[in-house]
Image (spheres, rainbow, N blue to C red):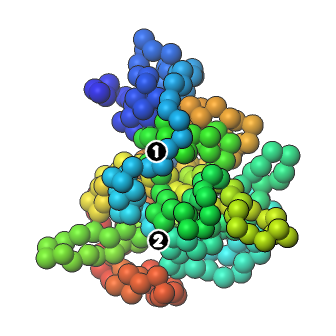
Amino acid sequence: MDVARGQSPVLVAAFSALGSTPNEASAAIICRSPRPVNGRLGADRLRHEPAWNGPAPAWPSATETATLRLMCGRFTQRPTSEMAAIFSAVDRLDDADSYFNVAPTQRIAVVVERPERERAIVGYRWGLVPSWTKGTARIPERMFNARAETVAARPIFRGLLAKHRLIVPADGFYEWRHGAGGSRQPYYIRRVDGRPLALAGLWASWHDPDAPEDVHEPLRSATILTTQPNALLGQIHDRMPVILAEFDWDDWLDPNLTDPTSVLPLLGPAAADLLEAIPVGPRVNSARNQGPELVEPVGPALAV
């Protein structure tokens, strides 16, 4: 599909998956802001909804699952009391620790806002467990990321995009740049102003059919959305997490905003000048290692 001037490639891909094309002749009309807003140029906004005509629920293909393995898989988080203040949420996790090497399957702090409930910081498993998973032996291993371009069309994610959206606060995340001879240089990506990143994510609730009868609490899990890289991240990796602009936080978390296509325009790459990528040491390669020394620079930051 050709991408017209001013259209987001990510948004075009998402509507293509829905069987629609974002152009003037279609039902999906995209408006763009002509000026920078909070450091993000040309924020897409959707005005009309395309029709949905999709398949029955299905698991990701083997190719998609293998691709997920290569995407954003480590990040850092600050104490939850600080997150609560920044995101105007109630701290229900009350975790005073900082984490410098968060990995999939671990508990992560997330921001959720459910109907009739206040916005809160809670703890979810990182790695999505769909509600229809049949027992612990069938829990998928690599669903810690989901592609923004296809999330609206994949039945496994479509309902979550409508009603189960969350934010994963992160002070930064790691990506590995492949070099000659199979070498890998880790980079720590963070905001240049030191504020936390608001990573767009989805969550699911699962009841273990094999759990004892007196266990009623479901397992809640999360996945982080990824998109095409900006000019900075493109030097390291072919994907990057979706980073929400601050003025989009309320819309993304709004439990009454249940039209999936209304939030698709939020899923593009963040501006390159919002971030910096600094090379760090190899100790981050092991998820067992923790501590602030993991984010200490070992060389100059990448230039755009």
What amino acid type should be assigned to the residue bearing mark 1?
Ala
**Dot 2, crowdedness within 10 Å: few (<14), some or many (≥20)?**
some
Expressed as whole percent of the image width and height from the top left, the position of residue 254 reads: 71, 42
Mark sitting earlier along the chain (1/2) = 2
Q: Is residue 170 visible?
A: no
Q: Is residue 52 left or right of residue 89?
A: left
Near-viewer residue (94 or 125):
125
* Residue 183 placement, left or right of 39: left
Hey, which quadrant is residue 211 in on the image?
A: bottom right
Among the 4 quarters of the image, the one containing residue 8:
top left
> What type is the residue that disc 2 sits on?
Arg
Q: Is residue 116 left or right of residue 39?
A: right
User: Spatial distance from mark 1 to mark 2, Cα to Cα?
Assistant: 19 Å
34 shown above or below 146 = above
| Identity of the residue drawn at 75% across and 51% down | 113
Secondary structure beneath label 1: loop
Q: Can you say whether 14 is above or below 238 in the image? A: above
Residue nearer the viewer, 297 or 208? 208
| Mark 1 surroundings: few (<14), some (14-19) or many (≥20) residues within 10 A | many
SS for dot 2: loop
Label 2 sits on residue: 74
Left or right of 156, for residue 240 = left
Residue 277 location (% of width, % of height): 37, 67
Give the x, y percent position of residue 16: 40, 29
- Report the residue marked by disc 1: 148
- Quadrant of the drawing holding the N terminus: top left
- Circles 1 and 2 in contact, beta carbons < 8 Å: no
Residue 27's x, y, as percent?
50, 16
